Image (tube, helix red, strand yellow):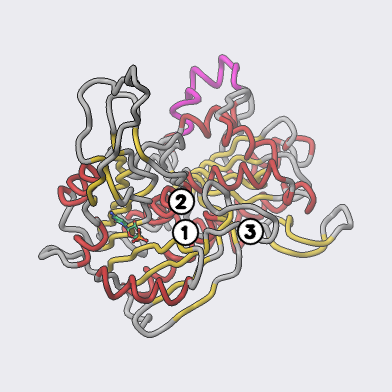
């Protein structure tokens, strides 16, 4: 870590005192820290303490002419190797997730071209609130890294997740984040498909399905965060891809297959797209009109190429091919058969019938899956799609490090 530098954004929370210790721990390891102290952060620790520990000027004002003449806020956000937010408050997380730039800290977070690591700290109810969950999931999908929060007793007397990670845990996370470029999956290329495909009937109508693309986008973000050179081939969806992935947008299954083949060779393929199984035999060149006699057109469908099976049996086959199986019944039996049929190494099987709360995984933020390999079947608890993505990437990492079956 020696010789590296961190921009530390200190948000407003009682855990801010631990950020002072974090600066010292980083200094011990030869890491230079420059700090932005938010207005709320300055209610908990003083600019003088931060300046003394960083041996640097402390930045806090977006509109300060003296600061701007010394170092502009854009440069400030890019000069460091990593941006660390500790404590990351609900406010800072929400601002970045929502794209707001209302003060120096949020502006630097939006303007940076470096990785962002957040150490959240807040009351347990706040952390569990639907809006903070949404922010956390959006940020994880965008490639933001997290450390903590930990479970435990909080300064406010409540108990649960919300305590900021300890300084040494944050140091370890910084160490991992700084190594990312050559990180756990550094040097490997990953190809991910996501979203639905649209199969045109005529210029205004198409056949598609309800896939949101959320799981595939989260997997691409997690692969990139682990250092893989990641290409995301996506059907039409309206979510943002991590800035760290190469996004290739396609419409039809045939386009998706061509885009995937153009990216070979690759080491890892994760095929999470909900590809339309069939397409209309002929896509009419102009809008199909209603007949005066009210006759109803007959659709003739033809089969689309199976992208997973094509890559699974390809002469340039990726070393690890992972498919998805969305089933509504007999999930494990169907998924196991699919693994063999499609030439996949692993299948992530999920039950897409509605869950006990009546929610469907299609379009939702949570997922409950099984990981099926040649020799094992593992049931994972229900968790956020971003967590499924991270856990899958852990397995992929172990596989390439040779510690997995
Ligand atoms: O056969 P089924 O659609 O259930 O298989 C699901 C798996 O196959 C997913 O990984 C999906 O991305 C992939 N698939 C594909 N091309 C198709 C159909 C499915 O890549 N035409």
Classify 10 Å Cα crowding around label 3: few (below 14), some (14-19), many (20 and above).
some
Quadrant of the snapshot with the N terminus: bottom left
State the predominant SS element of the stretch in magenta.
helix
Quadrant of the snapshot with the C terminus: bottom left
Q: Is residue 179 visible?
A: no
Q: Earlier in the sequence, mark 3 or mark 2?
A: 3
| Magenta part of the chain | 62-77
What residue sits right under mark 1 in the picture?
Answer: 389
Picture residue at 39% right of the left edge, 45% below the top: 195
Q: Position of residue 2 (x, y in %)?
A: 42, 56
Secondary structure of residue under mark 3: loop
Q: Using residue 268 as the reference point, say whether residue 362 is left or right of it.
A: right
**Of residues 283 and 217, which is closer to you in this image?**
283
Q: Using residue 201 as the reference point, say whether residue 350 is left or right of it.
A: right
Q: CA distance from mark 1 to mark 2?
A: 6 Å
| As drawn, 104 above or below 245 | above
Q: CA distance from mark 3 to mark 1?
A: 17 Å
Q: Position of residue 107 (x, y in %)?
A: 55, 27
**Of residues 277 and 216, which is closer to you in this image?**
277
- Which mark is on residue 148? 3
| As drawn, 391 above or below 296 | below
- Which mark is on residue 218? 2
The picture quadrant where one finds residue 398 is bottom left
């Amino acid at each position: 870590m020696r010789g590296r530098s961190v921009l530390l954004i200190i948000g407003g929370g009682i855990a801010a005192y631990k950020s002072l210790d974090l600066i010292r721990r980083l200094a011990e390891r030869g890491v230079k820290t420059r700090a932005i102290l938010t207005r709320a952060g300055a209610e908990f620790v003083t600019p003088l303490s931060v300046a003394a520990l960083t041996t640097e000027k402390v930045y806090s004002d977006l509109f300060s002419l003296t600061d701007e003449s010394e170092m502009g806020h854009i440069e400030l956000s890019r000069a460091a190797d990593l941006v660390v937010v500790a404590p990351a408050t609900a406010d800072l997380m929400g601002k970045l997730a929502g794209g707001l730039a209302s003060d120096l800290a949020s502006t630097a977070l939006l303007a940076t071209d470096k990785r962002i690591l957040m150490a959240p700290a807040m009351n347990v109810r706040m952390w569990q609130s639907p809006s903070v969950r949404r922010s956390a999931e959006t940020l994880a999908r965008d490639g933001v890294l997290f450390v903590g929060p930990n479970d435990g007793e909080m300064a406010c007397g409540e108990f649960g997740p919300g305590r900021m990670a300890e300084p040494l845990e944050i140091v370890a996370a910084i160490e991992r984040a700084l190594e990312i470029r050559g990180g756990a999956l550094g040097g490997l290329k990953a190809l991910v498909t996501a979203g639905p495909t649209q199969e045109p009937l005529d210029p205004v109508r198409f056949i598609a399905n309800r896939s949101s693309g959320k799981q595939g986008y989260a997997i691409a973000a997690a692969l990139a965060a682990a250092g893989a050179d990641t290409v995301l081939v996506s059907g039409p969806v309206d979510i943002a891809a991590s800035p760290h992935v190469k996004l290739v947008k396609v419409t039809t299954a045939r386009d998706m297959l061509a885009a995937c083949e153009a990216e070979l060779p690759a080491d890892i393929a994760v095929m999470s797209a909900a590809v339309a199984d069939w397409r209309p035999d002929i896509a009419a060149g102009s809008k199909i009109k209603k007949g005066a006699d009210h006759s109803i057109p007959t659709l003739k469908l033809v089969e689309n190429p199976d992208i997973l099976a094509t890559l699974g049996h390809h002469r340039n086959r990726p070393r690890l091919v992972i498919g998805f199986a969305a089933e509504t019944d007999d999930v494990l039996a169907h998924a196991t058969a699919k693994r063999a049929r499609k030439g996949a190494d692993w299948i992530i099987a999920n039950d897409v019938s509605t869950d006990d709360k009546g929610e469907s995984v299609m379009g939702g933020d949570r997922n409950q899956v099984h990981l099926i390999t040649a020799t094992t079947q593992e049931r994972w608890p229900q968790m956020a799609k971003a967590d499924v993505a991270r856990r899958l990437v852990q397995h992929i990492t172990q596989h390439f490090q040779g510690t997995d079956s």
